[in-house]
């Protein structure tokens, strides 16, 4: 089984499914599982406190799979002073896909491309998409309303077709996609691939704690709160985890990145849990490979059962 789109061609993968990078959740086990299953596993460089740890992490992934992988970089020199070194490690290991969030990709695009890497950029609005398209992005990741992590406010019904029509680059749908039905709906809107975060938290391969995984299974969309008070940028959080962690004062994204690089502070973020609205459809923990294969089968079944137009 394969599904061919501009994105699968670009990345040489079997399925148009990207395992979205997740802070403190996606490490080698999950990245390898998603890539080996025919999607592409991705992780944030920030998951490693030091450049040496990042190098060890990528070396481990490379030793366990020959398939393509993706690394997310936060390209903002004030927020992430280490971005240049993180980027150089990606070049050293010839990482196939660089995903940028926060900041313009202009500073890395030429170098990444001449090294054979593709550059995909997170966007939440048309304006942001125009900026990254001008900088030379290979594809847009439309981070829609309901996504886990830093989410946009625009419905996928609107943002995906708008970006497709106005920009013309391939579009990857992000936000609340946990099933084959939701994947098919994204394709109907014009997406060329899906970007899945939250669904992969509930896997044996994710680094989320057992309590976090259980909360994902037991919660639904109404158990989330969308606020900028936690990390300085509006994001979706599991309300109960915020109550438990007793968030006192609002953080800024600069604090989060800084703290990610300090051992003691780093641990604090382990108890503050993000998720997207797609938790409503997550009922069990299952291996990443099974999630992908089940999604493809459901996609195929629904595609065949959709009402046809009688001529
Ligand atoms: C726990 C968690 C951590 C995340 N960490 C990051 C991150 O470090 N960098 C990033 O670009 N996106 C991050 N995201 C956003 C995801 O990459 C992706 O946009 C999102 O998960 C897609 O929506 P979904 O969770 O509804 O599938 C995170 C999302 C979650 C749920």
Image (tube, rainbow, N blue to C red):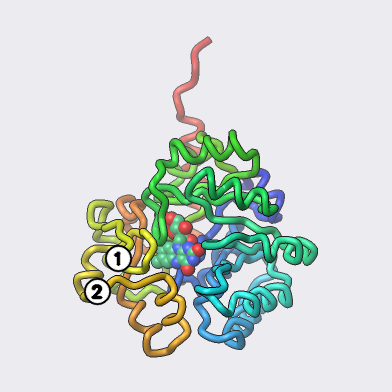
Residue 155: percent from left, percent from top: 40, 41
Where is ligand 1, by quadrant?
bottom left
Residue 214: percent from left, percent from top: 28, 67
Q: Nearer the viewer, residue 80 or 32?
A: 80
Mark 1 and mark 2: span between their CA atoms? Answer: 9 Å
Marks 1 & 2, CB-CB < 8 Å contact = yes
Mark identifier at residue 229: 1
Ligand 1 within 8 Å of disc 1? The answer is: no
- Report the mark closest to the observer, 1 or 2: 1
What residue is drawn where x is 45% and y is 80%? 258
Q: Is residue 26 depicted above or below 4 in this figure?
A: below
Residue 282: percent from left, percent from top: 34, 55
Q: Which of 55 and 59 is in front in this view?
A: 55
What residue is drawn where x is 36% and y is 68%? 231
**Residue reaching furthest to the top:** 311
Q: In this view, does 181 lie to the left or right of 121?
A: left
Q: Is residue 197 left or right of residue 231?
A: right
Residue pointed to by mark 2: 247
Label 1: which secondary element: loop
Q: Is residue 262 depicted above or below 240 in this figure?
A: below
What residue is drawn where x is 24% and y is 60%? 218
Mark identifier at residue 15: none
Label 2: which secondary element: loop
Specify few, some or many for label 1: CA neighbours under 10 Å numbering under 14, 14-19, or 20 or more. Answer: some
Q: Earlier in the sequence, mark 1 or mark 2?
A: 1
């Amino acid at each position: 089984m394969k599904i061919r789109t501009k994105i699968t061609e670009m990345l040489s993968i079997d399925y148009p499914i990207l395992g979205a990078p997740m802070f403190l959740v996606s490490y080698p086990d999950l990245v390898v599982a998603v890539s080996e299953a025919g999607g592409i596993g991705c992780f944030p460089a920030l998951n490693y406190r030091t450049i040496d740890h990042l190098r060890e992490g990528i070396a481990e992934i490379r030793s366990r799979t020959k398939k393509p992988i993706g690394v997310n970089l936060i390209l903002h020199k004030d927020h992430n002073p280490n971005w240049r070194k993180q980027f150089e490690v990606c070049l050293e290991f010839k990482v196939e896909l660089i995903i940028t969030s926060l900041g313009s990709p202009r500073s890395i695009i030429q170098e990444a491309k001449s090294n054979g890497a593709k550059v995909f950029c997170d966007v939440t609005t048309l304006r942001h998409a125009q900026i990254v398209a001008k900088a030379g992005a290979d594809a847009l990741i439309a981070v829609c309303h309901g996504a886990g992590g830093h989410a946009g406010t625009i419905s996928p019904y609107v943002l995906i077709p708008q970006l497709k029509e106005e920009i013309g680059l391939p579009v990857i749908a992000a936000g609340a996609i946990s099933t084959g039905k939701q994947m098919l709906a994204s394709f109907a809107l014009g997406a060329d691939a899906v970007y899945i975060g939250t669904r992969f938290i509930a896997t044996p391969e994710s680094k989320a704690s057992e309590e976090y995984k259980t909360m994902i299974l037991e919660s639904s969309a109404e158990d989330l709160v969308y606020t900028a008070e936690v990390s300085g940028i509006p994001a979706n959080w599991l309300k109960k985890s915020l109550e438990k962690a007793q968030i006192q004062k609002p953080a800024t994204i600069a604090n989060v990145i800084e703290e990610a690089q300090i051992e003691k502070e780093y641990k604090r973020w382990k108890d503050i849990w993000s998720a997207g609205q797609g938790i409503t459809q997550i009922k069990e923990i299952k291996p990443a490979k099974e999630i992908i294969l089940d999604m493809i089968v459901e996609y195929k079944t629904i595609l065949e059962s959709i009402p046809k137009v009688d001529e």
